Amino acid sequence: MNRILYSSLLYLLSPLLVLYLAMRAIKSPSYRGRWGERFGLSRLQSTDLLIHSVSMGETLAAIPLINKLMEKYPQLSVTVTTTSPTGSAEVTKAFGERVQHCYLPFDISWCVARFIKQVQPKQCIIMETELWPNLIYQAKRRGIKLMLANARLSEKSAKQYLQRPKLSTPMLQALDVIAAQSHQAAKRFIALGVEPDKVKVCGSLKFDLSIGQQHIDKAALLRSQWQRVDTPVWVAGSVHPGEFDIILASHKNLLIRFPEALLIMVPRHPEQFDVAANRIKAAGFNFARRSKGDEVSINTQVLLGDTMGELLSFYAAADQAFVGGTLITNGGHNPLEPAALGLPVYVGPNHRDFAEITQMLEQAGALSVVESSDDLVLQLVDKFDDNVAYLKTRQAGLKVVAENKGALAEQFKIASRLIEQ
């Protein structure tokens, strides 16, 4: 498939994109506005630098890099785009009016062309794997310098690119520089036709996460308010439908050994908050909803974290963590945040989006891959029972994170060179 055929297919499928937005809007209020941005119909100012940070995880990783660039180049005008409401919320929270922000349009040729014509950036930094053929083409034909930052490429994604070389190879070769997270990712990009001198191994920005003292202080206060200072607390973060019942089954078994244990279950998407509440209720737990301000007492068995922006504080308030999107076919979410807080971490087998990071943590003894509800509860009980094993796992995670910091400085150097060209 080449880009012209790809573009034609997107034109034909564009009515389905409207249907997609309508379906998401039914489930989540955050999708009910700003549709014009999705089709390049915004009124935007021209800018010096365009940064596309996709969703919440990529945005959180990008924020320190953007801050450093804005500090070094105060005259630089910056536009930051995302594709999800959660990512959008993080951009607004971090930068307010200091940057121009909107959703990146769908990769329909005329939508992207109109967007690029309005914004007119000199450089464009794209986070991780968010490569769109028409976006790259329209940027390149206007002489915009392109950087793929914090770049990851799984074996599965590399095989998918290989299946469509007429579409993927020109797109990848149009990039001016790729700051790869790992040697494995770098080799895959080169195998797909990227010139070796364009690929730099920098490590992952996610290792350079900074956990503010406010999260630690808030966590201590929460445990005190919940009457859980000395009783087991674990969190299931970024969980999806298909994982809810597995997590709840694990907790039901954990309560047999630790009757006062508390589970904090945090769904990945806001539209699943009510679904999760219904599953918890159906399982017969005494539970509280964070969004409703329900009291959490010693008798509360499950706290539903149905708010936005509190997951890091919940991790800080917990003793152990499961990271979701891994017991279903999804690709997984970031296990570094709980590891950086010293929590033993568990993920399911479907963690391809964080394969290298998961492998590093697992080899160090900071993370375990679980296959089932029974497997998960055995791991939880083991760490709650054995303080020596718990402390060993805790130190392993902290060590991995500490030893792999530095990606921010390396990627900042590359981005600076791109801007100064």
Image (cartoon, helix red, strand yellow):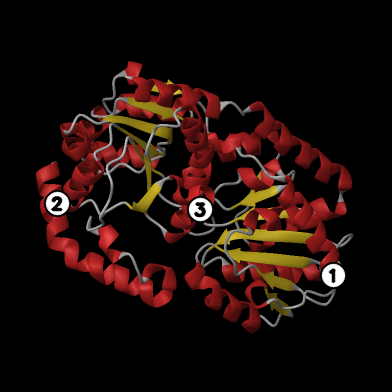
Q: Which residue is drawn at 22% across and 43% down?
A: 116
Q: Which residue is drawn at 22% across and 36% down?
A: 139
Tag 1 or tag 3, which sits nearer the N-term?
3
Q: Do the residues labelled 1 and 2 touch (CB within 8 Å)?
A: no
The amino acid sitting under disc 2 is Trp
Tag 2 or tag 1, which sits nearer the N-term?
2
Which is nearer the eye, 113 or 188?
113
Q: Which residue is drawn at 87% across and 42% down?
A: 388
Q: Quadrant of residue 37?
A: bottom left
Q: Position of residue 223 (x, y in %)?
A: 82, 62
Residue 90's disc is 3
Which is nearer the eye, 3 or 421?
421
**Dot 2: within a 10 Å radius of its alpha carbon, few (fewer than 14), some, or many (20 or more) residues?**
some
Which is nearer the eye, 333 or 43?
43
Residue 3 in view (yes/no): yes
Q: Which residue is drawn at 23% across and 29% down?
A: 174
Task: Please name the residue that numbered disc 1 is placed on.
Answer: 260
